[in-house]
Amino acid sequence: MATQYPPPSKRQKRERAEIAREQQDVDQAIPDGSVRVRFIDQATGETGSLPVLTVPLSQASTKNLEILLNELKEQGEDRIPYRFFPDGDVEALGDSEDLYHALVKPGKVSAESEIILQYAPQAVFRVKAVSRCAAAVSGHGDNILAIQFSPVDSSRMASGSGDKTVRIWDCDTGTPVHTLKGHTKWVLAVSYSPDGSILASGGYDNQVRVWDQSTGKQIGGPLTGHTNFITSLSWEPYHLQEPNRPRVASSSKDGTVRIWDAIGGKTDFALTGHKSSVTCVKWGGTGRIYTSSHDKMIKVWNAATGTLLHTLAGHAHWVNHLALSTDFVVRTSYHDHTRKVPATPEEKFAKAKSRFEKSATTGGEIVERLATASEDCTLFLWTPLTSTKPLTRMTGHQKQINQVCFSPDGTLLASAAWDNHVKIWSARDGKFLFTLRAHVGPVYMASFSADSRLLASCSKDTTLKVWDMRTGKLKEDLPGHKDQVFALDWSPDGDRVGSGGADKQVRIWRN
C-alpha cells in the first residue's frame, strides 16, 4: 500500500495561499531574457496612454501582468482582475499560465518581437459552476414554459406553466410559496420588475396579469386588450420609471406591443406597425423599446411618446428573439454582487442609473448594442442609437436560431439553435469565437452567470450543460430532467440555476 502523507497543516496552507496571493510561483525552467509587451484595450482596440513594456520572461505570468496593468492604470488600491488575449487568439491565457510556456516556447511568437496582449476586465467576484441538483420540485400539472429568478437574490423564483398557473418557489428550501391562479390558458411568459416586488405573467388567454410577489395576490384585474396570445414581457428600467408607477411592455401574436401601467391596470399606449406576430420586446435603458417580429423587421420606438424611431431590416425570415447588451444591468437595477440595498428611493434611483451608465459606457459614450436571432439561421448585431445599418451579420448556424443573449459584462454573445449547438461571438464586432458542441438535441435557451465566466444551456436532449467561457469547453453536464428542458435561468447573484420543462418538475441547481 502506498505511503499516505498527512494533509497539509493550517499553517502550510496559509503560507501557500500567501505566496499565491503575492506572486505566482514561476517555473524555474524559464530561461533568462525579456519580452516587449504592448497592452491593448479589447473594448476600443486602442493602447491609450499605456507604454510598451519590457518584461523579464521569468516574471511574465498572467497574475504578474495583471498587477502590472493595474499599476499602470493607477488602480492599485482596488485591483480589477483582467483576462489577456494574445493578438488574434480567441482563447485567453489561463490564470496560472505565463508568456514563455503559452506563447514563446510553442513558437507562436518570437521573444524578439513585440507581444500584443488584448486585455478585458473581469467581474471582481467569481461565480462557481453549478454541479448538482439541489431540489427537484413537483407541483405543476403541465409543461413548464417560463422561468425567472427574482433580481433581489436567488431565494425566489417564478415559473409559468401549461397548467394555467404561475408558481413562486422558495429555492432555499425547495418548496412552493405561492400558486398564482387566474389565467385561463397556458402561461407563456413571466417577468419580475427590476426592484423585485412585482411579477408579471402573460398567457395564451391574451391577458397580462400583475401579482404582488410577497403575498401572491393579484394587483388589480387582468390587463386586457391583446387579441392573441402574449409572447414576451419587459419591464421599464428602474432609472426611467416615474415613482410608484412601474410600466411593463407586452408583445403579442396579434402584431402589437402594449405598454401598461402595472399598478393602475391601464394601457398607456399600443405600438402598432408590425404586420405579423411580435416575437420579443425589450425595454432599453436609454428610453427605447425594441421589438422583433415575424414580418422580418425589428422596430425601435420612443418609450415616452410611443412613436416609431427606426425600422431595422436585413433578416430574410422571421426574427425569433432579440437581446440588448444592457439586459442584465436593466434587469437587476440597484441590486449588485455586494447585496447592499440603498435605503431611500432617491439612492435606489441614483444607484440604478449609475450602474446602467457604467455598464453601457464605451469610449466615453453610452452604447446599447442589439443582437437579433432569426429563422434564417443568422444573427445581426446593431447599434440602434447611432445607425440603422447592422454592424455585422453572423453566420454559421445550420438551422433556425431560438435565442440570443449578451453576457452581463457586454463582451460576449451566445446564440442557441436547432442545430444542437451554442455559438459564442464577440459582442464588440460579432467575430466568431467558439462552437459549444455536446448537446444531442436542439438547444432552446442559454443563460450567462453574473460574472460572465460561465454559460448554462438547456436542450431537447433533457440535459443542462455548463460551459467555461475562457476555453469554450464543457465544464459540467447536468442530467436529471426526464424530458426536454424548455426554460432556464441563472440567478443574478450567481448562486443557482433554475430549469423546467416537459417533465413538469422545477429543478434548482447549485454548486
Image (cartoon, rainbow, N blue to C red):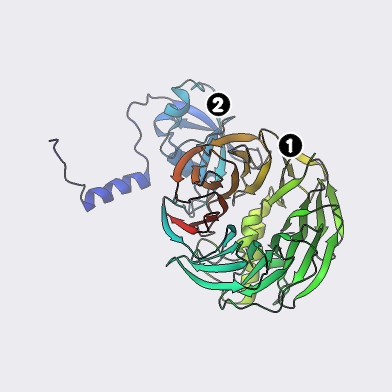
Which mark is drawn over residue 164? none
Q: How packed is label 2: few (under 14 Cα within 10 Å), some, or many (20 or more)? A: some
Question: Element under label 2?
Answer: strand
Q: Which residue is mark 1?
A: 393
Residue 443: which quarter of the image? top right
Q: Amino acid at mark 2?
A: Glu
- Which residue is drawn at the image coordinates 82% and 48% (left, top)? 295
Q: Is residue 280 left or right of residue 254?
A: left
Q: Earlier in the sequence, mark 2 or mark 1?
A: 2
Q: Which residue is mark 2?
A: 114
- Which residue is drawn at the image coordinates 49% and 42% (left, top)? 468
| Pair 2/1: label in front | 1
* Residue nearest the observer in this picture, 240 or 331: 331
As measured in the structure, the alpha-carbon distance from the residue carrying label 2 to the one carrying label 1 is 33 Å
- Which residue is drawn at the image coordinates 86% and 52% (left, top)? 275
Residue 144: which quarter of the image? bottom right
Question: Element under label 1?
Answer: strand
Is 5 drawn above or below residue 359 in the view shown? above
* Residue nearest the observer in this picture, 145 or 376: 145
Residue 374 lies, in percent from the top left, at 73, 43
Q: Is residue 376 left or right of residue 81?
A: right
Residue 343 lies, in percent from the top left, at 56, 76
